[in-house]
Amino acid sequence: MVRKKKFTLSTTQIILLSFLVTILVGSGLLALPISSIDGEAVPYIDALFTATTSTCVTGLVTLPTVSSWSVFGQVVILLLIQIGGLGIITIMSGLMLL
């Protein structure tokens, strides 16, 4: 009889994965044409950098926020800052309790 190994993630892996997913979703949203003020897609590397620094609450940017991002893009950045400010660990702990 062969036992199947149950796949589980450690707490550290869950936290790392949640950071990664948050940054990738945020950068995907920022790379959409609706996120830029001129309606053209922003280079993905700029969207990825902005999403990463927003989530990590670093505040570095490659593009000026007011003149480059539409209202939708600014809301995405604001949500990423809020998620990073509240803490991925806090949010994931609450979700795991549910």
Image: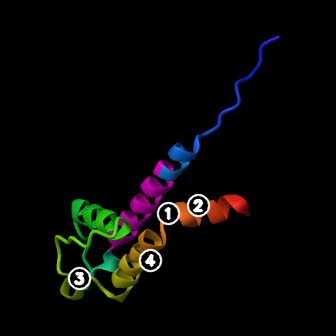
- Most extreme residue toward the top is 1
**Of tags 3 and 2, which is closer to the observer?**
2
Q: Which residue is mark 4?
A: 82
Residue 77 magenta: no
Residue 27 magenta: yes
* First to last magenta residue range: 16-32
Disc 3, SS:
helix
Disc 4, SS:
helix
Q: Which residue is mark 1?
A: 88
Where 11 falls versus 88 (above or below)?
above
Mark 4–mark 1 distance (CA, rounded to whole Å): 10 Å
Labels 3 & 2 near each other (Cβ < 8 A): no
At label 4, the amino acid type is Gln
At label 1, the amino acid type is Ile
Q: Which residue is mark 2?
A: 92
Mark 2–mark 1 distance (CA, rounded to whole Å): 6 Å
Magenta residues, dominant SS class: helix
